[in-house]
Image: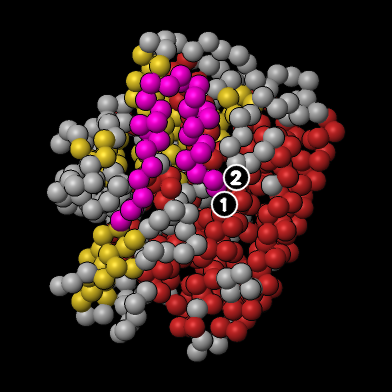
Amino acid sequence: MSRTIVGPFNRVEGDLEVQIETAEGVVSNAWVVSPMYRGFEQILHGKDPRDALIYTPRICGICSVSQSIAAADALAHACGIMRPKNGELALNLIHACENLADHFTHFYLFFMPDFAREIYCGEPWFDAVAERFKAVKGRAAADVMQARAEFMHLMGIMAGKWPHTLGIQPGGSTRGIEATEKVRLLSILSGFRRFLEQRLFGSPLEQILEIDNQRQLDDWLAAGDPAESDFRRLLQLSRDLQLDQLGKTDNRFMSYGVYSLEGERTFRSGVWYQGKRSKLNSDCITEDISHSWMEGQAEPQHPYHGVTLPDADADSGYTWCKAPRLDGQVVEVGALARQLIDGQPLINDLVTTGGSNVRNRMIARLLEIPRVLIEMEQWVRQLKPKDHFCVGSELKRESEGFGLTEAARGSLGHWVRIKNGRILNYQIIAPTTWNFSPRDQNGVGGPLEQALIGAPVREGEKEPVAVQHIVRSFDPCMVCTVH
């Protein structure tokens, strides 16, 4: 049976190739290939530990703050640094701004344009969807970019610039906020809320978050016009195209938790499997290189001890991506995992009845926007302009530390070992490394490789639209994947 190559994909950060085999009109096997190697982990070897704050954000231009947060957390953990409350609030606001902007951009500019493809021209909703969401030419593009730009002014005020801010430090944020700037920040959040309520949801945010189950969601959909709410349009498309039957995994999820404040995280950490939540033990994380273009120890290694040694001629390799596992198991990460593990009622109901699928991933991502925005409004109100935003610290010459956080696409971890005041080892596992991982030593594929099995392929279809929907539901960031 021959393989078909799908890709390279457009509207994806970095390079991605998917190889599939088909039988009886569906995908019977899949291999996910990350074809671009970058080498940030090698670059960091031997550097001053503080250099990680400069190098790691440049792994990516759209989730650089998440990389900064993970690096700052790793150094803070290695050196025993405690941030002041203002510093935690400021970092949460900067991080949340980037994550929400990513969700927002992904929905409007990456995911929805696929429904304006000519393959759907016979559908009754096609003209309306194409007029609003067609790539570049759709009416949504101009509306969304303006709303996004105005929202990102928060980043300019609090971080100085985006991407690659240096305001994020182990001790907090170097940018203090004045009393008058609090008013400006609240105004920015109010403007973004207005767009969400008027255009994305067509309802007050608090009303959206009161929807607790599938029945209530169906009632809300029936009570309004999809032309007046982009979220309703997604739900309509999901129903008509059965996106809840597309892109299923084995329903094992993980989240590191995110947005720390006074010892707690706004979204908690944990693992979810078969309807049960359990605590996360990060000591059980390993990286498997059995099917990667890498050389090194045959047995999977914890990131503290793993190495990144590229070998383009590795016999069993087919990707530059490693295969991270939790206690030897494949886990899916992302907004669906975050909201499920945090106990969001609607997501809990959708996953309990339908598992992980294209529709549920998208709903979780969109529901996270109002949940986080409401928290951001509270964080701004808690800022105390005359109190400290950052504390200084001395780096230890011999130590190790890790930083675990959540980027928009899922769990992001940095592990650093310091010896003689220099970086001895620095390992990174990004969200798409988890979701787009290759097979491990047991031959078990990662979440996307699992999700592609069973995807329909129409006769003569060179770039199966179902494959496109599944891939985009994970919102891949390939430059982070192979960092």
Q: Range of the magenta residues?
A: 33-62
- Count of marks overlaid on the render: 2
Q: Quadrant of the C terminus?
A: top left
| Image height of 57 relative to 315, above or below | above
Task: Check residue 102 in the rendering and tell me which mark sits there, or answer none.
Answer: 1
Label pair 2/1, CB-CB below 8 angstroms: yes
Describe the element under mark 2 as helix, strand or loop: helix
Q: Quadrant of the N terminus?
A: bottom left
Where residue 11 appears, x then y in whole percent?
Answer: 50, 62
Res. 447 in view: no
Q: At 55% from the left edge and 47% from the top edge, which residue is drawn?
A: 62
Q: Nearer the viewer, residue 252 or 21?
A: 21
Q: Nearer the viewer, residue 143 or 352?
A: 143
Where residue 454 appears, x then y in whole percent?
Answer: 28, 70
| Image height of 306 relative to 401, above or below | below
Whether residue 292 is in magenta: the answer is no
Q: At 81% from the left edge and 35% from the top edge, which residue is drawn?
A: 181
Question: What residue sits right under mark 2 in the picture?
Answer: 98
Q: Nearer the viewer, residue 59 or 76?
A: 59
Res. 435 in view: yes
Report whether 471 appears left or right of 376. left
Q: Amino acid at mark 1?
A: Asp
Report whether 286 appears left or right of 46. left
